[in-house]
Image (cartoon, helix red, strand yellow):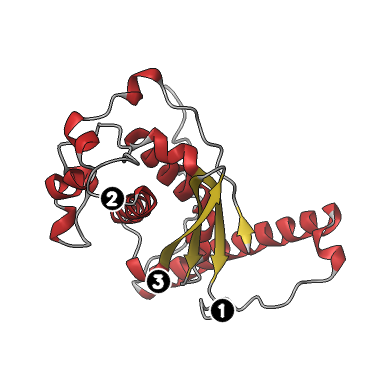
Amino acid sequence: MWNFLGFLRKPDSNSEAVSAEINADPRSFFVHSGFAAGPQSSFANSGFAASSFAPRNNDSNNVDPAATYRELVKTMYRDTIRMAGIPKNWLTCEVLTMTEAGKARFHIQFVVRQWDQEFLDYLPAFQKTFLDRVQRFSPALTERICAVAWRFSSNCGCSLLTLPPAGYWSDSARQARALAREQREVEALLSQRTQAHKSDAHFGFQDTRPMMLPPHANDRR
């Protein structure tokens, strides 16, 4: 399992303002945002997108703050993959809850279900985008996230199931692989030029050749 721990920022003083209506009833946020209408609803499109959201522990309707925070994490996750254009079946989000000093804290696991090398290159960027979104929307939730981890599904389609020899990671071996990649790139370019040349010959084009000028063509009289 790959672990990318998120470096969480402290909230700004301006981000501590909480909507009075949300403070009165945390569930009102989900109703106004459209969340109650279905799982595809988005906080980003709601009128509260710029507000700081923190459910209260002592509201009269016995709303579970931990459950509300978990739903908020899932919604921020769905918004992130939707805006990034990532296929939904490539990734899932799991939220583990633990208690520390009487306060619920959350361990977030992103599970990779589709192996794609280009996608893997952007996992740190995905994590940063997700955490930035949570920080903007709810600094209180940010303070409760203790870790972010990445896990790979056993059937994600990765063919690399055994580690290479220890020498694979040495500087000399890495340099040799880099040179080999450069050589393959050069050979691919040469192959493309050869194919283009054959295509020109097929249409009757001839190679460019130097042209002999007639005698005295350059004489000035």
**In this orientation, which residue lies closer to the viewer: 128 or 73?**
73
Q: For marks 2 and 1, give the CA distance.
A: 37 Å
Q: In this view, does 110 lie to the left or right of 27?
A: right
The residue that disc 2 covers is 63
The residue that disc 3 covers is 199
The residue that disc 1 covers is 154
N-term-proximal mark, 3 vs 1 = 1
Q: Which residue is drawn at 57% across and 42% down?
A: 101
Q: Which residue is drawn at 33% across and 66% down?
A: 88
Location of residue 131 with respect to 168 vertically, above or below: above
**In this orientation, which residue lies closer to the viewer: 199 or 176?**
176
The residue mark sitting in front, 2 or 3, is 2
Q: Residue 26 carries which label?
A: none
Query: Around disc 1, counting alpha carbons within 10 Å, would you say few (fewer than 14), some (14 to 19), or many (20 or more)?
Result: few
Location of residue 102 with respect to 37 vertically, above or below: above
Location of residue 16 with respect to 38 vertically, above or below: above
Query: Around disc 3, counting alpha carbons within 10 Å, would you say few (fewer than 14), some (14 to 19), or many (20 or more)?
Result: few
Q: Residue at x 76, y 72 (%)?
A: 163
**In this orientation, which residue lies closer to the viewer: 109 or 53?**
53
The amino acid sitting under disc 1 is Ser
Determine contact: label 3, label 1, CB under 8 Å: no
Determine contact: label 2, label 3, CB under 8 Å: no
Determine contact: label 2, label 1, CB under 8 Å: no
